[in-house]
Image (cartoon, helix red, strand yellow):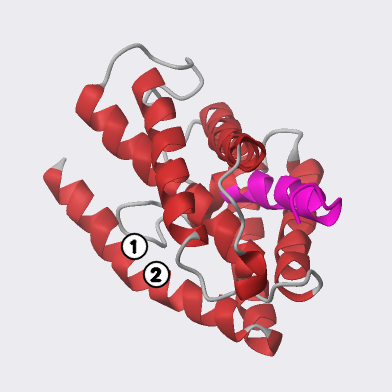
Amino acid sequence: MKNEIYKRLLSSILLIPVALFFIIQGSFFLIFFLIICFFISAYEWHLMTKKIKFLLGGYIVLIFSFYSVFELRNNLSGEYFYILLVTIICVATDIGGYLFGKTFKGPKLTKISPNKTYSGMFGGFFLSFISTHVYINNINFAQFKIETSIEFFLIVLLISAISQLGDIIISYFKRLSKIKNTGKIIPGHGGLLDRIDGMIFAFPFSYLIFYSELII
């Protein structure tokens, strides 16, 4: 278990700065990054679902998801504020779920994903709240000094919940395909889909929220 944690930690240390570079740079850097990630994700989805009947639907979700990432970065005011906000929520949700689940264990959340527990679910919510609070109170975007209101934390709760639901959905398809991971490209994590499963659903949901100016 410790070896697995070390692999996950090292992969995260290497991947997070790379992802941040492309997000902050934007422009063709981000487009290049999204295209690479899309084709890797689509390939993993193809391998995972080629024997079941959900192949086309997955491609549609992936296209809309990556398109929403591009829109959040380039076509909403605020430069990379929103895309980083959603990324932080999703990453914090994943880390909080993993740490709390491994530490406190407890009742299983669902049979679809046996490793998911209620303690992990609450841990994901907790760390996403803490991380978001730190982010919005230390950013340099003067026009985005958002108050940590009940309404805003409700948005964070919903995005975190969607992220966790996305994780469970991908786990469901992995169970249907009788595989543990979607790939082996990221040591300690598996495939790219294993890493971004929650984001695939959280980004489109978030884009619809921000675009409708619920909290802008």
Q: Residue furthest top?
A: 107
Q: CA distance from mark 1 to mark 2?
A: 5 Å
Is 6 displayed left or right of 64 in the figure? Answer: left
Query: Residue tagged by mark 1?
Result: 12
Residue 117 coordinates in the image, percent (x, y): 38, 21
- Name the amino acid, label 1: Ser
Where, quadrant-wise, is the N terminus in this rendering? top left
Of 63 and 123, the residue lying toward us: 123
Is 187 displayed left or right of 163 in the figure? Answer: left
| Location of residue 104 with respect to 216 vertically, above or below | above
Task: Identify the residue shown where x is 75% and y is 36%.
Answer: 54
Task: Identify the residue shown where x is 63% and y is 36%.
Answer: 162
Query: Residue tagged by mark 2?
Result: 15
Q: Secondary structure at mark 2?
A: helix
- On the question of residue 182 being in view, the answer is yes
**Residue range (magenta):** 199-216
Q: Residue furthest right?
A: 212
Q: Give the prevailing secondary structure in the magenta stretch.
A: helix
> Is residue 191 highlighted in magenta?
no
The answer to whether the residue labelled 1 contacts the one labelled 2, judged by CB atoms less than 8 Å apart, is yes
Q: Residues within 10 Å of mark 1 (few under 14, many from 20)?
A: some
Residue 110 coordinates in the image, percent (x, y): 48, 16
- Name the amino acid, label 2: Leu
Task: Identify the residue shown where x is 47% and y is 60%.
Answer: 135
Q: Secondary structure at mark 1?
A: helix
Dividing the picture into quarters, in which one does residue 26 lie?
Answer: bottom right
Dividing the picture into quarters, in which one does residue 104 lie?
Answer: top left
Q: Residue furthest left?
A: 2
Is 85 displayed left or right of 215 in the figure? Answer: left
| Location of residue 204 with respect to 170 vertically, above or below | below
- On the question of residue 91 being in view, the answer is no
Residue 180 coordinates in the image, percent (x, y): 42, 37
